[in-house]
Amino acid sequence: ATQIFGVGKGTPSNVVTNSSPTTLGSSITFTATLVGGAVTPTGAVSWTVSGTAGISSCSTSTTTLSPSGTATCSITASAVGSYIVSDLYGGDGNYLSTPSAPDTISAGLNPQSITFTTPANGTVNGSFLLAPTATSGLPVALTVDAATTNNACSLTLDTVNYLHAGNCVLDANQAGSTTFAAATQVQKTITVN
């Protein structure tokens, strides 16, 4: 007697991963990896992107799987916050349609740092032009710190004026913006003689 067996379609695993970590303005690539049994899944995935505003066209696209069963979706982190991506595998002759679990990545503000140099010493009634810069290109605010002794110095814009013998302590700050995080304060001390 001849027996006939029907074999149903399998359900592949469908996992989405991302290229974390990321900062504002950088590209984020999400990769869907579909793994079946003896046969690699074929077909396409449809992407769903949600979360933070400013999502790219990837949110409505369909990507064909590579021969190894992967597909990618790239977006630009155009706003600070979380991006949530998932895909829906459409299925093929061997495998059923299968959704992935959502994958989340957060985009933060770009880091920045401050650089400026001071002389180790200054002379009463002298001055020195400081040139503080931030890697962001944003303006740097200079202030005389409360730790300054004997009213040793003052500031006129970016020029430090040496008034009395003592320690002149200067602080450089950059508060950040909608694109850059606040910089870590830089403090310099000049001995005024």
Image (cartoon, rainbow, N blue to C red):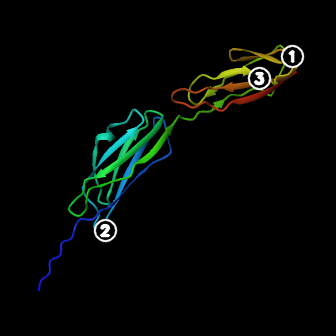
55 lies left or right of 160: left
Mark 3 — residue? 145
The residue type indicated by label 1 comes to: His
Residue 142 in picture, x, y percent from top left: 69, 21
Q: What is the quadrant of residue 134 in the picture? A: top right
- Point 35% across, 53% down: residue: 100
Dot 3 or dot 1: first in sequence order is 3
The residue type indicated by label 2 comes to: Gly
176 over 63 or under it: above or below: above
- Point 57% across, 24% down: residue: 138
The residue type indicated by label 3 comes to: Asp
Residue 37 badge: 2
Q: Distance between the residues labelled 3 and 2?
A: 67 Å
Find numbered disc 2 in the image and state the secondary structure of the residue it sits on: loop
Task: Farthest residue to the left: give it.
Answer: 1
- Point 50% across, 45% down: residue: 21
143 over 109 or under it: above or below: above
The quarter of the rendered structure image containing the N terminus is bottom left
Mark 1 — residue? 164
* Front tag of 3 and 1: 3
Task: Farthest residue to the bottom: give it.
Answer: 1
- Point 25% across, 53% down: residue: 90
